[in-house]
Image (spheres, grey):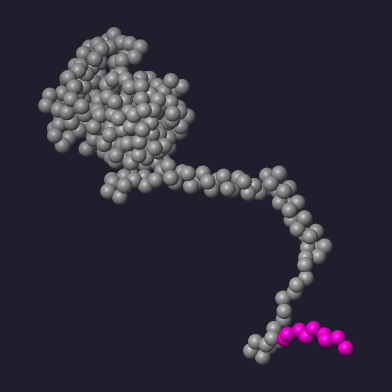
Amino acid sequence: MKNRKVKSVYYIHGFKLKRASSKRPGVPSFVLFLMLSGFMFYGVRAGLMPSPTALLHKGTQKIAASVLKENPADGDKSVLSSNTGGKKPQKIKVKNKELNQQLAIKARQYNNVKWSVYVEDVNSGLTASYNEDADYKFGSISRLAVLPALETKVNPDRWNNYYFGSPIKDCVNKGLGQSNDACYDKLTKYLGADYINKTIKSYGYDIEFDGSFNATTSSEKMGTYIADLKRGQSLFAKTRRALFDSLYAPKQTAGLSLGCGDCRVANKQSNDKNTAIDAGVVTHGARSYVVVVVAEGGTFDQITDMAQTIDRYMQP
């Protein structure tokens, strides 16, 4: 008689332990697998569910974005969540009626010039203006409004890296100065007009760039943007520092710089197509006010005269 193979029986806590089945999947299991695979394929083709490739690509994009927008250094505590979009809290604006009248009187003295003026005290929110809602192309002053797009694309902590042969920090410093700079222009083209427009609007400002990176806006809207920069209500702290380090460079030129007495001026000028524009911050000690003056058909000497009138009413 042949020995029969004896199956071992195991008990746990008095109960017989069933052995795992060693059966292979039969035909029904295979058919079910084919049906599920077919349903998933149809769902992806019909757009009812995302493809595994799309999900993987989306996850990769999130990782890349987190690397590109890496957190600023721990020491930079004054960073604002400006790149989350939305209008920033602003000062309650009150009109200086007397200065408003003086701006109108001064504008009539140069009746061959079309003026647009906006003034805002950084500390109090006191404003004065003349024809402030007229739109103009701001020429090289447009570079100020490129900064939101630049800081969201490349974190300011990485501005020592070389782009187009120079550190980004050097490109920004030169580009925001009074002279033109090819490096900053290359950075602007790298960002693209669509990305710049999308970002500046997400920060809450109505400024529109065309294909040649010339921004169109009003003196009031540009002035509000600059006032927010000075108050620290927009841009990363390191971006603002780079901006004002460049703009506060000493200069004695006609316009805002010669239009105030014992003051410091952080400004940028544009003179394009018979339109002189001066925009910046005038500082007297701890007090500052923003000025944007557009003189269509005018000169910077005439802007100096307008700036002197403004300073008499705005200085502390």
Going 31% across and 45% down the picture, which residue do you hit?
Answer: 79
Q: Quadrant of residue 223?
A: top left
Classify the position of the N terminus by image quarter: bottom right
Judged from this view, the residue extending furthest toward the front is 1
Going 36% across and 25% down the picture, which residue do you hit?
Answer: 183
Classify the position of the C terminus by image quarter: top left
* Residue 105 among those drawn in magenta: no
Q: Quadrant of residue 241?
A: top left
Q: What segment is highlighted magenta in the picture? A: 1-9
Residue 139's place in the image compared with 77, above or below, is: above
Judged from this view, the residue extending furthest toward the bottom is 14
Residue 270's place in the image compared with 125, above or below, is: above
Rendering coords of residue 203 (x, y %): 39, 37
Rendering coords of residue 7 (x, y %): 76, 84
Main secondary structure found in the magenta portion: loop
* Residue 5 among those drawn in magenta: yes
Rendering coords of residue 196 (x, y %): 43, 31
Going 46% across and 43% down the picture, which residue do you hit?
Answer: 65
